[in-house]
Amino acid sequence: MNKLFNWILKYPRVILVVTLVSSAALFFVMKNNSRMETDLDKYMPQQHPAFVYSDQAEEWFNINDGIIIAIEHENGIYNSGTLQKVKDLTKALQQMDEINKKDVTSLYTADNIIGTDEGMDVKAFYKRVPQSDGNLKTLRQNVRNNDMISGRLVSESETVTVIIAEIEDDVFTQEFYKNILETAKTYEGPENVYVAGRPIVEGTMALLGPADMKRMVPIVLTVIVLVLLWVMRSFKNTIFTMLVVLFSVVWAFGLMALINIPIYAVSTMIPVMLIAIGVADGIHLYSHLDLFMLKNPNTGKMEAVKDMLAGMWKPVAMTSVTTAVGFISLLTSQVYPIKYFGIFTAIGVMMAMVFSLLLIPAAILVFGLPKRKPKVGKSEKKSGHIAYRFAEAVVKNKVVTYISIVFIVVLSIYGMSKVWINSSFLEKFETDSDIVLTDKFINQNFGGTSTINVILESQDENVFKQPHVMQLIDEMQAESEKLTLVGNSFSLADYLRRMNKVMHADSVEYDTIPESNKLIAQYLLLYEMSGDPENLWKVVDYKYNKANITLQLKSDNSKAINAAIAVVDQFVDRFQKFGVSVKYAGSGYKGLVFTDLILQGQITSLLLSLIIIVVLLSIMFRKISIGFIGAVPIAVTAFISFGIMGLFDIPLSTTTALISSIAIGIGIDYAVHFIERYKINALETQDRTKTIQETMHHSGRAIIFNALVVIAGFLVLLASVFPPNRSLGALVSLNMFTSFLGTITIMFILIYASNIYFKNKS
Amino acid sequence: MNSLKTNYTLILFFIILPVLTSAQEKPIGLEVMQKVYDRPDGNDMQSELAMTLTNSRGDQRVRKIRQFVKDMGQVEKKIMFFLSPADVRNTSFMNWSYDEIGKDDDQWIYLPALKKTKRISSDSKSDYFMGSDFTYDDLGDRHPTDDTHKILRQENLNDEACYVVESTPKNEDYMYSKTISWVIKDKWIGLKKEFYDEDGELLKILTVKSFSKIKDYWIISESEMKNVQKNHTTNMKLQDIKIDFGIESNKFTERMMKRGIK
């Protein structure tokens, strides 16, 4: 290896040019070929049975996410102006290319099933906007009398009405999003117009997240550069440390573009990982160089570089390989974007290693050694004393560390038991943001902005014309509506109850499921004859052996969805008796399954990479005990990370779960550098005190620099306006800190206590 | 002399033809549609209607209906009995349609499971007929004077010489913004019809699949309506057609609805 370095060091200029040119080339590939994947469905594992089924059910019943536009008039909506707006806005939405005409529901398009003296009628609430007081009153009375509309399309307070436009998954674009918001705005005054619904939440998130990142990343980088300057006290060192990070990011994304893999939302985490991990190599190399120069002030640059490479290539390579392997364990995930995230972060980490070992030495040879200010020597000595004293203090007070670790682990396990998964999109926003307030407003006035679809299916045709089956559905709806977070539910049972009541002169006692199967069949025929049967196909299929029950929820968080599912699950056995199976569908449900998948994968790969790292470290240091000792900081970091999430009620989400892999990447870096230095010192001195002092001075110093730089950089994200980016910043900083602390305390003590590398075991 | 005469004829032709055609354009469109509307189809008819509904996924439902129709001068009365599916057997439907302009149809339905006859008020002829893709108007109820008509062109369709007539409703609130009909010249049968929705987009296409001469009347025995926006199709096929067999006038009563088909 040293031969290879010696050979390379002969051509430093060539190395600089080659790295620059190849990185520039990849940068252009990246610039021209990269594309962002915005279709959320592309993120889902298409073959997963839950998704296959949900997609199928969505097609059967034309289940789509709805954009909800609420129109509020303080004095009530029953005036011709507001009704005109409902009509105009409905038509405007129907005109949009992205929306199918039949998928817009409002008071203007809704069917009104009404009882007449002699029978029943299904007609529109209005076609021409009613002008006279009498007609307006009639309309109001019609809505009040109709449970299928009142509370669903018009609020109980009669001051708000909604228009729901369902859109298919693949039509949502930024332009459409802006268009919808702008269109809605033009209808304001004196009415207030609100826009909500899952597509809007997703759209806002897709817009806000990256926009916020774009604003924050330059600040993060500036802070990192400043702190690097402060700890390295050299422009050159800072620049080349950052160039290593920059080039590794360019290579990761360039290669991605080269083989035509789109950028997924999680891929935006790759630079985050590479910044946190990539600066470490530079810091450790330069730190080693500094200490060497301090001891040997008069050596030439070639000799200094050679010493640096000889002493550091091993730990740099080892840390990079273990980190990369840790990320490659993400290949076990079922979710493709996560697999790609793992692979390309691993590639980036390996490239960071290559660049650190090539670019940094080459740069020193070409541009000279970093200039040092005279007073630095003094402070180095001082820091040396601090390190020595710290090392001794840790060893002396190891009981404190042991107790703290036990305490922390116990507390973390308690915290971990409280960790919950959240697939909610809405809860990623500030609680006082427009989108959350709008959602709250609509939830207060209507059944709920989120939905989950319960899909019932049977082999027998016409099973959903059987009274006992329909009664069970009705009972299940009533039971689920007892939950405060289930605002409303809707199924074929609602149609049947409504028609039964209407056909019996609006008598309340007939607001039930008809007793005979023939009567149900005949009501349904009657409905088809009088109304628009298209509406029926949203709740039941053509052959009456599949049914769709929509539960409207006041929240899209996982707790809410799971609570609703729990109620429905109680009915599974009873449905089974009728040969009816119960399954779920809809984007809320898919989101829940998806999050579960990501987390399962994340936990599996976390455990897997921990095992791999123990094995790798054991092989690298040829001692199994080292494998376990080296894994301690990672384990501590992971424990604390999950523990704090539980204790502070930070739910696991795709972002927060991925951050746990940073614990591995960084934890392993610290451990490897520390152990390698410890080993070198131990073999050199055979003196335990001296070894720990020197190791703390050498590695401890680099580790604290590394931690300082990244923590400072990521703390900047706390000022972000997008909450997920804030938790990202907080958790990365936290992980850096605990890894650092774990390495220089518990791992330090363990390795000291283990007596490894000392022949004299006394 | 000869050539002069030809010249005069030519001049006459060129001057008069445009005048004639422009003068005739309006009446001709209306005339065509009036002839379709007035095409004699007997005083009474009974038949078995098989209505096949096909949704966008290709699922099908078939309904069999025994129907009786009688033209009683100012009013046309129709009674229908469901034969299948079994759970709606003997559900019956009666419709009285009046010639008088502005007078709504009277409609009744009898649900055997409820043992009650109910009126269904139909204030709109744009209601769909029994869950099919046909509205009552589509089935031939709409009077030609409700629209203005224009002959677009003449062309052959299925080897039949046709007038292609565009009809625009006089009432702007009507469910269609326009329809285009292909009418067979000598038979006055609408062979095909396109329906455009309120926004001018193609909504439905009606195709006549077969027609035949029964007792000197041209009778459409199979037609298909496809809603291209919903991708839903209705096929209506008449079998066992009997014309002018003399159906009693008292066949069309609530009592008969309740009695059903044995």
Image (cartoon, rainbow, N blue to C red):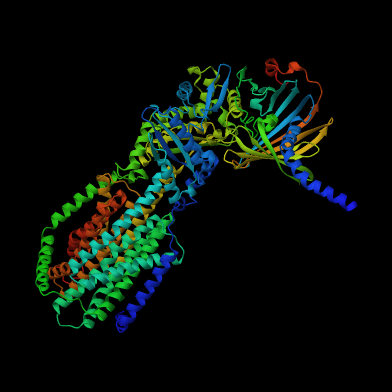
Q: Who is closer to the viewer here, A232 or A693?
A: A232
Left/right placement of residue A506 relative to residue B43 reads left
A259 left or right, relative to B144: left
Q: Is residue B208 visible?
A: no
Examine the image and state in which quarter residue B41 appears: top right
Q: Position of residue A208 (x, y in %)?
A: 35, 50
* Front-lying residue, B123 or B29: B29
Percent position (x, y) of residue A206? Answer: 39, 51
Above or below for B233 versus A111: below
Quadrant of residue A414 within the rendered picture: top left
x then y, percent, for residue A73: 38, 31
The quadrant where residue A374 appears: bottom left
Q: How many marks?
A: 0
Observer able to see residue A465: yes
Hey, which residue is sitting farthest right in the picture?
B1
Please tell me which residue lies in front, A200 or A187.
Answer: A187
